[in-house]
Image: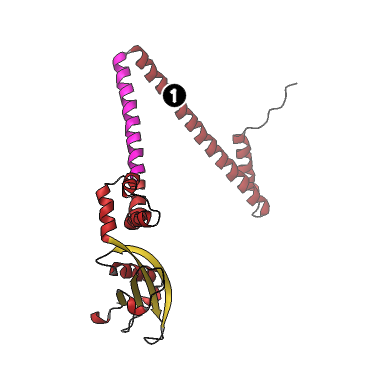
Amino acid sequence: MSKPTEPTVAELRADLAERIESEPPGMSASMLRAVVDMLDDWQAERAQRTRDREEALSDRSRHRETEQRWLTDPETGGRYAGSALAGFAAGAALDRLREAGRARKVWENRYKPIMSEIIYYARHRARVPAADIAEELDVSEGYVYRILRTHAEYEYRLDVRDGAPGPGWRSFESVDVVAPTNEPEVIAYRAIKEYLATHPEHADHESEPRLRVLIWTAAAEEQPDVKAVRTVLWPDPDDQ
């Protein structure tokens, strides 16, 4: 007596589809239709896996044929090796380019804007000799001396006016910075720009100044407002 055979997936699918035709609309027909859809999806995925496997086998076969030509024909092998080496060199060059680009962006955004401050504090606070600073940063010693000669340490205080001028001013922050000796007002412009970036509600200014930056040459003790070397108002009343 022969053992009964199990139905194939195609036979099962055909049987279920036939039963759907005879089922009245309702839960049973919906469940049968869902099973048929599931079988259709499974067959489609299985067919795609089969195609992918056949393509992979074909690629391996072509690769083996290429290797065989490489071993038996020196001229063909030379072209194959040259192509592989060229591809490797191109990939390495692209990786180096991207790495250099990332490093350049870090330099431009994080270190370049404060390079004078790094040099100044290294010399005056850490007492690092100029020659050692130059060697550490891979710059000329003359560049270090130029930064030290043309920059100075300042302290600034940013005030915000909520009410009328005078008593309406309140201190927002006090910071020690390094800036060019001939234009310490750049400190004020940078402080105002950074403040407005985080407080856009003050960007729509009135005719009266809303921000004030007082700048002093750095000193150990607190200095009165009248001793400030620069006072910058924003908006500038002279520009109204």
Residue farthest toward the right in the current orientation of the protein? 1
Q: Is residue 213 magenta?
A: no
Q: Nearer the viewer, residue 3 or 44?
A: 44
Which image quadrant for residue 35?
A: top right
- Which percent across, then down, holds residue 210? 36, 80
Q: Quadrant of residue 18?
A: top right
- Asked where in the image residue 13 lies, by quadrant, the reply is top right
Q: Does 148 sit above or below residue 39?
A: below
| Quadrant location, the N terminus | top right
Give, as a single range, the part of the protein colored magenta. 74-101
Q: Residue at x 39, y 65 (%)?
A: 176
Element at label 1: helix
Q: Nearer the viewer, residue 175 or 74?
A: 175
Disc 1: which residue: 60
The amino acid at mark 1 is Arg
- Predominant secondary structure, magenta span: helix
